[in-house]
């Protein structure tokens, strides 16, 4: 009888550990999901800023002050604008790639939680069968 109780204790303990680990995996998945949303929002904001700056640049190029620049000054200004845009696009793309990678981790964490809940149910079911003996 002591061996049976000891075995049941071990099965129930294992079931509870699996549930705790499943909860932790779900928390991790939720954190990753929030990170994905944040990264995508930041990338969207950068993209909107790029479009705003491009529109402002077009307006600025038709201004008399810009036309007063020498061709070399205009070229230098365009190159500086292009470099800034390229840097912003790179940051935006990096954020989107990181969001994509983290999104895959969300799916993995959700699968881990599901597997752990299944293990907990299996341990409890087996414990119930042992109790019936």
Image (cartoon, rainbow, N blue to C red):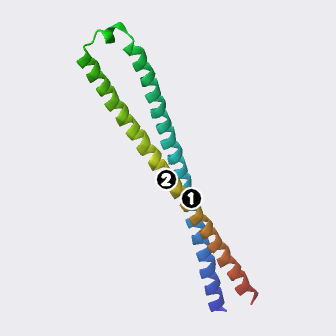
Residue annotated with mark 1: 107
Residue annotated with mark 2: 102
Image spot of residue 128 (x, y percent): 72, 81
Q: Going by the image, does 29 lie left or right of 131? A: left
Say the numbered circle drawn on residue 73. Answer: none
Question: Which residue is nearer to you in this view: 22 or 32?
Answer: 32
Separation of residues labelled 2 and 1 (CA atoms): 9 Å
Question: Which residue is nearer to you in this view: 1 or 22?
Answer: 22
Count of numbered tags? 2
Question: Which residue is nearer to you in this view: 8 or 78?
Answer: 78
The residue that appears at 51% across and 38% down in the rendered structure is: 41
Image spot of residue 67 (x, y percent): 32, 10
**Neighbour class for label 2 at 10 Å: few (<14), some, many (≥20)?**
many
Image height check: is 50 above or below 36?
above
The residue that appears at 43% across and 39% down in the rendered structure is: 92
The residue that appears at 67% across and 73% down in the rendered structure is: 121
Res 66 quadrant in image: top left
Question: Which residue is nearer to you in this view: 64 or 5?
Answer: 64
Mark 2 lies on a secondary structure that is helix
Q: Going by the image, does 130 lie left or right of 40? A: right
The residue that appears at 38% across and 40% down in the rendered structure is: 90
Image height check: is 122 above or below 109?
below
Mark 1 lies on a secondary structure that is helix
Image height check: is 41 above or below 65?
below
- Contact between labelled residues 1 and 2, with CB atoms less than 8 Å apart: no
Q: Residue furthest right?
A: 132
Image height check: is 14 above or below 114?
below
């Amino acid at each position: 009888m002591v061996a049976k109780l000891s075995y049941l204790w071990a099965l129930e303990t294992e079931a509870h550990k699996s549930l705790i680990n499943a909860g932790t995996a779900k928390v991790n998945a939720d954190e990753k999901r929030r990170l994905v949303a944040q990264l995508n929002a930041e990338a969207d904001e950068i993209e909107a800023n790029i479009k705003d700056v491009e529109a402002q640049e077009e307006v600025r190029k038709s201004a008399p002050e810009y036309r007063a620049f020498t061709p070399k000054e205009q070229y230098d200004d365009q190159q500086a604008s292009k470099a800034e845009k390229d840097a912003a696009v790179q940051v935006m793309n990096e954020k989107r790639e990181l969001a994509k990678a983290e999104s895959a981790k969300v799916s993995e964490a959700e699968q881990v939680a599901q597997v752990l809940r299944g293990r907990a149910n299996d341990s409890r079911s087996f414990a119930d069968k042992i109790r019936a003996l």
